Image: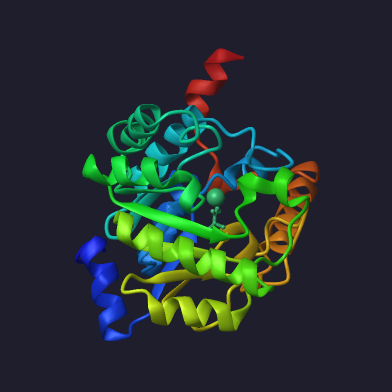
Protein backbone atom coordinates (compact mmCIF):
# COMPACT_ATOMS: atom_id res chain seq x y z
CA UNK A 1 0.00 0.00 0.00
CA UNK A 2 1.07 3.61 -0.58
CA UNK A 3 2.86 5.16 2.36
CA UNK A 4 0.98 7.69 4.49
CA UNK A 5 3.07 10.86 4.38
CA UNK A 6 2.96 14.53 5.37
CA UNK A 7 1.15 15.27 2.10
CA UNK A 8 -1.38 12.53 2.91
CA UNK A 9 -2.19 14.50 6.09
CA UNK A 10 -2.86 17.67 4.05
CA UNK A 11 -4.83 15.77 1.39
CA UNK A 12 -6.96 14.04 4.03
CA UNK A 13 -8.00 17.40 5.49
CA UNK A 14 -8.71 18.84 2.04
CA UNK A 15 -10.81 15.81 1.05
CA UNK A 16 -12.57 15.61 4.42
CA UNK A 17 -11.15 12.16 5.20
CA UNK A 18 -10.43 11.53 8.86
CA UNK A 19 -6.85 10.64 9.84
CA UNK A 20 -6.35 7.65 12.13
CA UNK A 21 -3.54 7.58 14.68
CA UNK A 22 -2.70 5.12 17.46
CA UNK A 23 0.27 4.79 19.76
CA UNK A 24 2.77 1.96 19.33
CA UNK A 25 5.88 1.11 21.30
CA UNK A 26 7.05 -2.25 19.97
CA UNK A 27 7.60 -4.22 16.76
CA UNK A 28 4.85 -6.84 16.89
CA UNK A 29 2.08 -4.44 17.89
CA UNK A 30 3.19 -1.87 15.29
CA UNK A 31 3.07 -4.59 12.65
CA UNK A 32 -0.52 -5.53 13.57
CA UNK A 33 -1.76 -1.93 13.65
CA UNK A 34 -0.08 -1.19 10.32
CA UNK A 35 -1.65 -4.30 8.80
CA UNK A 36 -5.05 -3.15 10.12
CA UNK A 37 -4.55 0.03 8.10
CA UNK A 38 -3.90 2.77 10.66
CA UNK A 39 -2.59 5.93 8.96
CA UNK A 40 -0.04 6.90 11.57
CA UNK A 41 1.66 5.46 14.64
CA UNK A 42 2.78 7.70 17.46
CA UNK A 43 5.61 6.38 19.58
CA UNK A 44 4.26 8.42 22.48
CA UNK A 45 6.12 9.26 25.65
CA UNK A 46 3.04 7.65 27.24
CA UNK A 47 5.29 4.59 26.94
CA UNK A 48 6.62 5.79 30.31
CA UNK A 49 3.37 4.68 31.93
CA UNK A 50 2.18 1.99 29.54
CA UNK A 51 5.48 0.18 28.86
CA UNK A 52 7.76 1.16 31.73
CA UNK A 53 5.35 1.56 34.65
CA UNK A 54 6.25 5.15 35.57
CA UNK A 55 3.68 7.41 37.17
CA UNK A 56 3.87 10.04 34.42
CA UNK A 57 5.84 10.91 31.29
CA UNK A 58 8.51 13.04 32.95
CA UNK A 59 11.08 10.28 33.48
CA UNK A 60 11.16 9.20 29.84
CA UNK A 61 14.48 9.96 28.11
CA UNK A 62 15.47 10.52 24.50
CA UNK A 63 17.31 7.18 24.68
CA UNK A 64 14.06 5.42 25.70
CA UNK A 65 12.26 7.10 22.79
CA UNK A 66 14.92 6.13 20.24
CA UNK A 67 14.89 2.52 21.47
CA UNK A 68 11.10 2.19 21.02
CA UNK A 69 11.02 4.18 17.74
CA UNK A 70 13.48 1.70 16.24
CA UNK A 71 11.26 -1.24 17.20
CA UNK A 72 8.11 0.40 15.78
CA UNK A 73 9.82 1.53 12.56
CA UNK A 74 10.87 -2.03 11.81
CA UNK A 75 7.24 -3.21 12.06
CA UNK A 76 5.69 -0.68 9.68
CA UNK A 77 5.16 -0.71 5.92
CA UNK A 78 2.55 2.01 5.31
CA UNK A 79 1.87 4.07 8.43
CA UNK A 80 3.75 7.26 9.25
CA UNK A 81 5.89 6.81 12.38
CA UNK A 82 5.96 9.84 14.70
CA UNK A 83 8.51 10.04 17.50
CA UNK A 84 7.38 11.95 20.59
CA UNK A 85 10.00 14.32 22.00
CA UNK A 86 10.33 13.62 25.75
CA UNK A 87 10.53 16.13 28.59
CA UNK A 88 13.72 18.21 28.56
CA UNK A 89 14.73 17.10 25.04
CA UNK A 90 13.49 20.41 23.55
CA UNK A 91 13.42 22.78 26.53
CA UNK A 92 17.07 23.63 27.04
CA UNK A 93 18.46 25.11 23.84
CA UNK A 94 17.37 25.35 20.22
CA UNK A 95 20.51 23.49 19.12
CA UNK A 96 19.87 20.67 21.56
CA UNK A 97 16.27 20.41 20.34
CA UNK A 98 17.26 20.03 16.68
CA UNK A 99 19.83 17.38 17.59
CA UNK A 100 17.30 15.39 19.66
CA UNK A 101 14.60 15.62 16.98
CA UNK A 102 17.22 14.52 14.47
CA UNK A 103 18.13 11.49 16.58
CA UNK A 104 14.51 10.26 16.51
CA UNK A 105 14.73 10.37 12.71
CA UNK A 106 18.31 9.21 12.18
CA UNK A 107 18.62 6.60 14.93
CA UNK A 108 14.94 5.89 15.61
CA UNK A 109 13.76 5.68 12.01
CA UNK A 110 10.79 8.00 12.68
CA UNK A 111 9.33 10.07 9.84
CA UNK A 112 8.26 13.00 12.00
CA UNK A 113 8.40 14.25 15.59
CA UNK A 114 5.82 15.64 18.01
CA UNK A 115 6.37 18.10 20.83
CA UNK A 116 4.17 19.81 23.41
CA UNK A 117 3.50 23.53 23.72
CA UNK A 118 2.94 26.72 21.74
CA UNK A 119 4.64 30.10 22.10
CA UNK A 120 7.08 28.72 24.71
CA UNK A 121 8.67 26.34 22.22
CA UNK A 122 8.15 28.22 18.96
CA UNK A 123 11.87 28.91 18.30
CA UNK A 124 12.59 25.20 18.69
CA UNK A 125 9.73 24.29 16.33
CA UNK A 126 11.02 26.69 13.66
CA UNK A 127 14.56 25.32 13.93
CA UNK A 128 13.45 21.67 13.74
CA UNK A 129 11.27 22.45 10.70
CA UNK A 130 14.27 24.22 9.11
CA UNK A 131 16.25 21.00 9.59
CA UNK A 132 13.69 19.32 7.27
CA UNK A 133 12.08 17.36 10.08
CA UNK A 134 8.26 17.31 9.94
CA UNK A 135 6.77 18.44 13.27
CA UNK A 136 3.39 17.83 14.93
CA UNK A 137 2.30 20.24 17.67
CA UNK A 138 0.41 19.28 20.84
CA UNK A 139 -1.87 21.69 22.72
CA UNK A 140 -4.50 21.57 25.46
CA UNK A 141 -3.64 19.05 28.15
CA UNK A 142 0.08 18.61 27.63
CA UNK A 143 1.10 15.84 30.06
CA UNK A 144 4.70 17.05 30.41
CA UNK A 145 3.24 20.12 32.18
CA UNK A 146 1.49 17.95 34.80
CA UNK A 147 3.30 19.63 37.70
CA UNK A 148 2.27 23.07 36.46
CA UNK A 149 -1.35 22.10 35.75
CA UNK A 150 -1.57 20.24 39.08
CA UNK A 151 -3.45 17.27 37.60
CA UNK A 152 -5.05 15.94 34.44
CA UNK A 153 -7.99 18.20 33.63
CA UNK A 154 -9.79 19.67 30.65
CA UNK A 155 -8.03 22.75 29.25
CA UNK A 156 -9.38 25.84 27.50
CA UNK A 157 -12.75 26.24 29.21
CA UNK A 158 -12.42 29.94 30.05
CA UNK A 159 -12.34 32.60 27.32
CA UNK A 160 -8.75 33.50 28.22
CA UNK A 161 -7.51 29.89 28.23
CA UNK A 162 -9.36 29.12 25.00
CA UNK A 163 -7.92 32.23 23.32
CA UNK A 164 -4.40 31.15 24.33
CA UNK A 165 -4.87 27.71 22.75
CA UNK A 166 -6.22 29.26 19.53
CA UNK A 167 -3.27 31.69 19.38
CA UNK A 168 -0.78 28.89 20.02
CA UNK A 169 -2.39 26.79 17.27
CA UNK A 170 -2.06 29.65 14.75
CA UNK A 171 1.51 30.30 15.88
CA UNK A 172 2.44 26.61 15.43
CA UNK A 173 0.86 26.55 11.98
CA UNK A 174 2.85 29.66 10.98
CA UNK A 175 6.01 28.01 12.34
CA UNK A 176 5.45 25.14 9.92
CA UNK A 177 3.99 22.22 11.87
CA UNK A 178 1.97 19.88 9.63
CA UNK A 179 -0.65 18.85 12.22
CA UNK A 180 -1.63 19.59 15.83
CA UNK A 181 -2.77 17.15 18.51
CA UNK A 182 -5.53 18.65 20.68
CA UNK A 183 -5.80 16.84 24.00
CA UNK A 184 -8.64 17.23 26.51
CA UNK A 185 -10.27 20.40 25.22
CA UNK A 186 -14.01 21.06 24.85
CA UNK A 187 -15.47 19.74 21.59
CA UNK A 188 -16.66 23.14 20.38
CA UNK A 189 -13.24 24.71 20.93
CA UNK A 190 -11.58 21.87 19.00
CA UNK A 191 -14.14 22.40 16.21
CA UNK A 192 -13.36 26.12 16.04
CA UNK A 193 -9.61 25.47 15.92
CA UNK A 194 -10.04 22.76 13.27
CA UNK A 195 -12.01 25.22 11.12
CA UNK A 196 -9.48 28.03 11.58
CA UNK A 197 -6.44 25.94 10.71
CA UNK A 198 -5.36 24.82 7.23
CA UNK A 199 -3.44 21.92 8.78
CA UNK A 200 -5.26 18.94 10.34
CA UNK A 201 -6.03 18.59 14.03
CA UNK A 202 -5.78 15.18 15.70
CA UNK A 203 -8.01 14.93 18.74
CA UNK A 204 -7.80 12.92 21.95
CA UNK A 205 -10.57 13.85 24.33
CA UNK A 206 -11.38 16.72 21.95
CA UNK A 207 -14.62 15.55 20.33
CA UNK A 208 -15.59 14.41 16.87
CA UNK A 209 -14.88 17.53 14.81
CA UNK A 210 -11.11 17.11 14.73
CA UNK A 211 -9.58 16.06 11.42
CA UNK A 212 -8.32 12.85 12.99
CA UNK A 213 -8.29 10.93 16.27
CA UNK A 214 -5.56 9.34 18.38
CA UNK A 215 -5.82 6.93 21.30
CA UNK A 216 -3.30 5.03 23.36
CA UNK A 217 -3.47 1.53 21.86
CA UNK A 218 -3.36 -0.26 25.22
CA UNK A 219 -6.33 1.88 26.38
CA UNK A 220 -8.28 1.16 23.18
CA UNK A 221 -7.57 -2.57 23.45
CA UNK A 222 -8.41 -2.70 27.16
CA UNK A 223 -5.01 -3.92 28.30
CA UNK A 224 -3.90 -1.06 30.52
CA UNK A 225 -6.16 -0.33 33.46
CA UNK A 226 -4.08 1.71 35.93
CA UNK A 227 -5.99 4.80 34.80
CA UNK A 228 -8.73 5.16 32.19
CA UNK A 229 -9.65 8.71 31.16
CA UNK A 230 -13.26 9.59 30.22
CA UNK A 231 -12.34 9.94 26.54
CA UNK A 232 -11.13 6.33 26.15
CA UNK A 233 -13.35 3.83 24.37
CA UNK A 234 -12.39 0.18 24.78
CA UNK A 235 -12.74 -1.66 21.48
CA UNK A 236 -11.59 -4.92 23.04
CA UNK A 237 -11.04 -6.38 26.48
CA UNK A 238 -7.60 -7.92 26.05
CA UNK A 239 -7.09 -7.72 29.80
CA UNK A 240 -9.61 -10.52 30.28
CA UNK A 241 -8.31 -12.41 27.25
CA UNK A 242 -4.73 -12.32 28.53
CA UNK A 243 -5.67 -13.34 32.07
CA UNK A 244 -7.88 -16.24 30.96
CA UNK A 245 -5.32 -17.48 28.41
CA UNK A 246 -2.60 -17.33 31.07
CA UNK A 247 -4.75 -19.26 33.55
CA UNK A 248 -5.49 -21.90 30.89
CA UNK A 249 -1.76 -22.30 30.19
CA UNK A 250 -0.89 -22.64 33.88
CA UNK A 251 -3.65 -25.22 34.46
CA UNK A 252 -2.78 -27.31 31.41
CA UNK A 253 0.93 -27.46 32.13
CA UNK A 254 0.33 -28.36 35.79
CA UNK A 255 -1.95 -31.21 34.66
CA UNK A 256 0.52 -32.27 31.94
CA UNK A 257 -2.13 -31.60 29.27
CA UNK A 258 0.45 -29.29 27.73
CA UNK A 259 2.74 -29.95 25.94
CA UNK A 260 0.96 -32.67 23.99
CA UNK A 261 2.25 -34.68 21.01
CA UNK A 262 1.79 -31.91 18.44
CA UNK A 263 4.08 -29.55 20.39
CA UNK A 264 6.79 -32.12 21.07
CA UNK A 265 9.90 -33.42 19.29
CA UNK A 266 10.55 -37.15 18.87
CA UNK A 267 13.50 -39.52 18.70
CA UNK A 268 13.48 -43.14 17.44
CA UNK A 269 12.93 -45.73 20.21
CA UNK A 270 16.00 -47.67 18.98
CA UNK A 271 18.18 -44.68 19.60
CA UNK A 272 16.82 -43.79 23.01
CA UNK A 273 17.07 -47.43 24.20
CA UNK A 274 20.81 -47.41 23.57
CA UNK A 275 21.15 -44.36 25.80
CA UNK A 276 19.49 -45.90 28.88
O1 LIG B 1 2.29 10.14 24.44
C1 LIG B 1 1.19 9.99 23.89
O2 LIG B 1 0.63 8.87 23.82
C2 LIG B 1 0.53 11.17 23.34
C3 LIG B 1 -0.84 11.01 22.77
C4 LIG B 1 -1.82 10.64 23.80
C5 LIG B 1 -1.25 12.19 21.98
O3 LIG B 1 1.12 12.21 23.33
NA1 LIG C 1 3.02 12.32 24.56
Q: Position of residue 189 (x, y in %)?
A: 56, 78
Count of labels in the image: 0
Ligand 1, by image quadrant, is bottom right
As drawn, the residue found furthest toward the top would be 275
Q: Nearer the viewer, residue 234 or 207?
A: 207
Q: Is residue 212 left or right of residue 190?
A: left
Q: Residue at x 26, y 63 (%)?
A: 4
Q: Is residue 194 left or right of residue 147?
A: left
Rendered-image quadrant of the N terminus: bottom left
Q: Position of residue 207 (x, y in %)?
A: 58, 80
Rendered-image quadrant of the C terminus: top right
Please tell me whether residue 44 is drawn above or below residue 215 in the rendered image.
Answer: above
Residue 258 makes an appearance in the image: no
Q: Position of residue 235 (x, y in %)?
A: 61, 74
Please tell me whether residue 228 is drawn above or below residue 96 in the rendered image.
Answer: below
Residue 123 makes an appearance in the image: yes
Please tell me whether residue 245 is drawn above or below residue 102 in the rendered image.
Answer: below
Q: Is residue 231 left or right of residue 178?
A: right
Q: How is the image coloured?
A: rainbow
Please tell me whether residue 213 is drawn above or below residue 176 in the rendered image.
Answer: below
Q: Residue at x 43, y 59 (%)?
A: 32
Q: Residue at x 54, y 32 (%)?
A: 88
Q: Is residue 73 left or right of residue 234?
A: left
Q: Nearer the viewer, residue 64 or 221?
A: 64
Q: Quadrant of residue 110?
A: top left
Q: Position of residue 128 (x, y in %)?
A: 31, 41
Amino acid sequence: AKKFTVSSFQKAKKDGNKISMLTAYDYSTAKLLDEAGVDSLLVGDSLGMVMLGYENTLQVTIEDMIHHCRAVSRGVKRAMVIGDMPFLSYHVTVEDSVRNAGRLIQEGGAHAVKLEGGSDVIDQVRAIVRAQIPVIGHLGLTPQSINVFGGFKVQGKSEEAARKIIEDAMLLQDAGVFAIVLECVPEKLAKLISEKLDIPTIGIGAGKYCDGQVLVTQDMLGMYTDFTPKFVKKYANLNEEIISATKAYINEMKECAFPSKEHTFHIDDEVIEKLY
